[in-house]
Image (cartoon, rainbow, N blue to C red):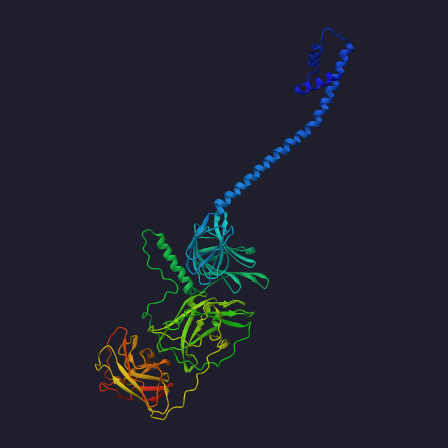
C-alpha cells in the first residue's frame, strides 16, 4: 500500500489530478486473479485522499521559495544591466563631451600653463593649444593670450589671470575667473562667471556684447563696453547693464554689496583696451574672405631711431630732498628689475613694482618713482611705458636734470601714475611696469656706475637705489649722495678757450665749429668738469643732430645737445652745448684739450644762415681766442661773454 501511495504522489505531480479518472485507472491495473473487495476499494480511496492532502501541503511549502528564487535572480540581472549601461554612458560622456575641444588658446606674448581635467603634467603653451571641458588656464605675468570658443567670438586675458573652462549643458561653455583681468567679446548664449570669495557675478543674458572682468578694491567688477548684458549676483536678482556702465560686487563689512554706476570713457584709451580693439579688428579681417590685413602691431614694439618727435627741454628741477633711510619692513616698498643688462647701449630699460605691505588701500596716483642715472651727453630724451598691468596709458615719465652732479647721477627719470591706474590693495602690488627711455638721436648711454642701474637684478627684487615717494615724501630707497666738492677755482684768466671756423660758407646745411680748452693754471683739471656753448640761430625749427668728427681725447668722449632759448638773444635763439665724459681724462697744467672737431645739422638737411650768428666768425680759419664762445666749469662761466638779451 505504501508503494501505491508513492506512485500516486508521483503521478499527481506530473499531471493535473482527477480523482475519479485516477481511481478507474488504478483499478484497471489490478490483475484478474486478485479478488476485488469493497474494503480494498475503500483502502485505495483512503490512500488516494492522504496523497492528495500531502501533495497540497508540499506545494504550499515549495511555492514561496521558488518565487523568491526567481525574484532575486531577475533583480540581479536587472541591476547588472543598469550598472553596465551607466558605465557605458559615463564612458561616452567623457569620450565625446568632456574630452571634446571646446576652445582654442592662442598666446601672443609670454606663456600660459594648462592643467588638464584628467590630471597629468601641466602643459606650458607659447603658441596655441586646444582646451577641453574643466581645463584650468593660468598665465605668466607678462602674458597676453586669446581664447576662441565655438560659442563665443573671443576672450583675452593679461598677466596674472586664472580661468577654468566649464561645460554648461546647451549654453556651451563658461569661464570661472579667479584673478587678473579678462576681455570678452561674445554671442548671446555665452555665459561667464567671475568669482571672488563669496560673491559671484554671472552673466546670464544679453546680445552681442563686449565687456571686461577684473577685481577692483577688493570687489569683483564687470565693465560693459558694447551692447547690453544681464547679470545675476547671488540673491540680488537680475541686473541690467548697458554700454558705459560697470557693476561692482563683493562683501563689505560682512554684508553683500552690489553697485551699478557709469565709468569714464577715457579708460578705454588705456593700452589694454586699445590692444584688444586692434585684435578685434584683426580677427574680423581674418574672418572675411580675401582679407588682406596689415601687419599687427605688437605691444612693446620699439620705434625706429629718429622717428620720435623731439620733446621740449626738461624744466630745471628744484632742490631734491635729502637722502633718507629705507622704511621699516612691512610698509611701502619697491622692487626693480633690469630689463637690459648691456650697460653701453642706446636705451635704458628699468622695470618696477610698487609693494603695499600695509593694512590700507593706497591710490597709485600718490606715488612717484625716481631712477637715477648719468645722461652721458646732453640730449632731449624720450620715455615709453611698453607694458603695465594697470595700463601703460596710466604711466607717465619725465626727465629732470640735477642742479649739481651727485654720485652716479646727473639726471633722474621720474615715473608717475594717472588716477585711472587705480589702487593697490593691502598686501598687493602694482603689477609690472615696463619702462624704457632713450635720447632723441639714439646715441649710447654708459650705465656703468649709474646709481640706480644694477645688471644683477634680472628678476624682480628690492633695490634701495631706486627711490619711491608718496605725495612727494621719500618712503623707500636712498637717493645718491652729493658728488665730492670740486677743487678750488683756479685764478682768474687761467682757463680759456680757442675757436676755429671749420666751414666758411655761412649758408650751407652744416655748422662746423672746432674748439680747444686751455689750462694755464698750476693744477690738473678733469675735462668732465667743462661745458662749451656755441650760440646761433636755427633758421627754421627742426630736430638737429650732432657729431664729433674727431677729437684728440676720443670722439666717443664728446657729446653735444641742443637747447632752445626761452627768449631770443642778440644773434642767437639756440645754443649747442658740448660736454665731456669722464673717459676724456684731464688737462695738465699749462696744457690743452687738443682739437675737438664738431659738426651739427638739421634732420632734413635744410640750410642755416650763419651770417650774424653770435658765435660764428669767418675770420677764425685757425685756432685763436674768441670770447663769443663761452666756457663753463661745473656750471660756472669761466671764459667768454654770453649774448645780450633783445
Visible residue check, residue 192: no
Q: Which one is in front, 574 or 386?
A: 386
Image point (61%, 36%), residue name: 76
Image point (40%, 62%), residue name: 274
**Which quadrant is the N terminus positioned in?**
top right
Q: In this view, does 364 lie above or below 70?
A: below
Q: Which image quadrant is residue 64 in?
A: top right
**Percent position (x, y) of residue 2?**
75, 17
Residue 305 as seen in the image, left or right of residue 54 = left
Number of disc labels? 0
Visible residue check, residue 564: yes
**Which quadrant is the C terminus positioned in?**
bottom left
**Percent position (x, y) of residue 51?**
73, 19
Q: Which one is in front, 274 or 102?
A: 102
**Percent position (x, y) of residue 447?**
40, 75
In the image, farthest residue toward the right:
39
Q: Which one is in front, 63 or 589?
A: 589
Image point (48%, 44%), residue name: 96
**Percent position (x, y) of residue 292?**
31, 55
Q: Which image quadrant is residue 331 in?
A: bottom right
In the image, farthest residue toward the top:
33
Q: In this view, does 332 lie above or below 299?
A: below
Amino acid at each position: 500500500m505504501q508503494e501505491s501511495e508513492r506512485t500516486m504522489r508521483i503521478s499527481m505531480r506530473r499531471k493535473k489530478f482527477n480523482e475519479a479518472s485516477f481511481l478507474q485507472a488504478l483499478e484497471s491495473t489490478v490483475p484478474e486473479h486478485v479478488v476485488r473487495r469493497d474494503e480494498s476499494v475503500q483502502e485505495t480511496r483512503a490512500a488516494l485522499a492522504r496523497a492528495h492532502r500531502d501533495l497540497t501541503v508540499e506545494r504550499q511549502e515549495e511555492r514561496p521559495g521558488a518565487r523568491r528564487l526567481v525574484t532575486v535572480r531577475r533583480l540581479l540581472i536587472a541591476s547588472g544591466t543598469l550598472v553596465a549601461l551607466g558605465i557605458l554612458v559615463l564612458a561616452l560622456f567623457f569620450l565625446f563631451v568632456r574630452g571634446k575641444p571646446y576652445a582654442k588658446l592662442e598666446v601672443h606674448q609670454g606663456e600660459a600653463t594648462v592643467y588638464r581635467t584628467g590630471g597629468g603634467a601641466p602643459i606650458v603653451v607659447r603658441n596655441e593649444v586646444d582646451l577641453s571641458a574643466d581645463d584650468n588656464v593660468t598665465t605668466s605675468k607678462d602674458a597676453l593670450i586669446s581664447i576662441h570658443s565655438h560659442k563665443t567670438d573671443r576672450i583675452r586675458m593679461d598677466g596674472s589671470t586664472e580661468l577654468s573652462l566649464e561645460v554648461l549643458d546647451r549654453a556651451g561653455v563658461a569661464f570661472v575667473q579667479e584673478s587678473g583681468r579678462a576681455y570678452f567679446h561674445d554671442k548671446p548664449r555665452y555665459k561667464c562667471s567671475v568669482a571672488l570669495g563669496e560673491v559671484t557675478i554671472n552673466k546670464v543674458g544679453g546680445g552681442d556684447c563686449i565687456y571686461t572682468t577684473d577685481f577692483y578694491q577688493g570687489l569683483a567688477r564687470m565693465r560693459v563696453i558694447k551692447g547690453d548684458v544681464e547679470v545675476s549676483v547671488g540673491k540680488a536678482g537680475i541686473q541690467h547693464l548697458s554700454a558705459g556702465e560697470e557693476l561692482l560686487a563683493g562683501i563689505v563689512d560682512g554684508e553683500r554689496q552690489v553697485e551699478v554706476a557709469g565709468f569714464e570713457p577715457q579708460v578705454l584709451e588705456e593700452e589694454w583696451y586699445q590692444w584688444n580693439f586692434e585684435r578685434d579688428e584683426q580677427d574680423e579681417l581674418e574672418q572675411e574672405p580675401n582679407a588682406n590685413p596689415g601687419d599687427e602691431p605688437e605691444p612693446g614694439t620699439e620705434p625706429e631711431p629718429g622717428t620720435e618727435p623731439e620733446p621740449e627741454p626738461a624744466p630745471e628741477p628744484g632742490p631734491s630732498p635729502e637722502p633718507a633711510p629705507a622704511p621699516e619692513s612691512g610698509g611701502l616698498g619697491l622692487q626693480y628689475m633690469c630689463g637690459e643688462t648691456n650697460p653701453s647701449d642706446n636705451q635704458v630699460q628699468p622695470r618696477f613694482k610698487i609693494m603695499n605691505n600695509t593694512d590700507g588701500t593706497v591710490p597709485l596716483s600718490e606715488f612717484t618713482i625716481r631712477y637715477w642715472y648719468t645722461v652721458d651727453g646732453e640730449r632731449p630724451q624720450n620715455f615709453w611705458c611698453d607694458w603695465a598691468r594697470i595700463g601703460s596709458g596710466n604711466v607717465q615719465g619725465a626727465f629732470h636734470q640735477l642742479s649739481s652732479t651727485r654720485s652716479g647721477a646727473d639726471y633722474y627719470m621720474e615715473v608717475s601714475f594717472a588716477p585711472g591706474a587705480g589702487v593697490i590693495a593691502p598686501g598687493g602690488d602694482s603689477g609690472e611696469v615696463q619702462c624704457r627711455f632713450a635720447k632723441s638721436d639714439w646715441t649710447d648711454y654708459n650705465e656703468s656706475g649709474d646709481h640706480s642701474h644694477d645688471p644683477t637684478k634680472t628678476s624682480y627684487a628690492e633695490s634701495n637705489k631706486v627711490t619711491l615717494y608718496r605725495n612727494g615724501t621719500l618712503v623707500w630707497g636712498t637717493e645718491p649722495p652729493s658728488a665730492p666738492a670740486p677743487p678750488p677755482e683756479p685764478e682768474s684768466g687761467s682757463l680759456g678757450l680757442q675757436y676755429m671756423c671749420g666751414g666758411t660758407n655761412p649758408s650751407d646745411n652744416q655748422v662746423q665749429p672746432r674748439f680747444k680748452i686751455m689750462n694755464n693754471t698750476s693744477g690738473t683739471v678733469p675735462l668732465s668738469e667743462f661745458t662749451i656753448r656755441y650760440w646761433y640761430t636755427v633758421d627754421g625749427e627742426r630736430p638737429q643732430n650732432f657729431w664729433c668728427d674727431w677729437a684728440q681725447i676720443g670722439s666717443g668722449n664728446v657729446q653735444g645737445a641742443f637747447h632752445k632759448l626761452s627768449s631770443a638773444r642778440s644773434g642767437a635763439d639756440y645754443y649747442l652745448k658740448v660736454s665731456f665724459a669722464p673717459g676724456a681724462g684731464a688737462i695738465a697744467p699749462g696744457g690743452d684739450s687738443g682739437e675737438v672737431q664738431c659738426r651739427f645739422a638739421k634732420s632734413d638737411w635744410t640750410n642755416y644762415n650763419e651770417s650774424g650768428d653770435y658765435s660764428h666768425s669767418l675770420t677764425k680759419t685757425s685756432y685763436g681766442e674768441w670770447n663769443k664762445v663761452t666756457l663753463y666749469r661745473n656750471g660756472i662761466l669761466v671764459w667768454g661773454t654770453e649774448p645780450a638779451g633783445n
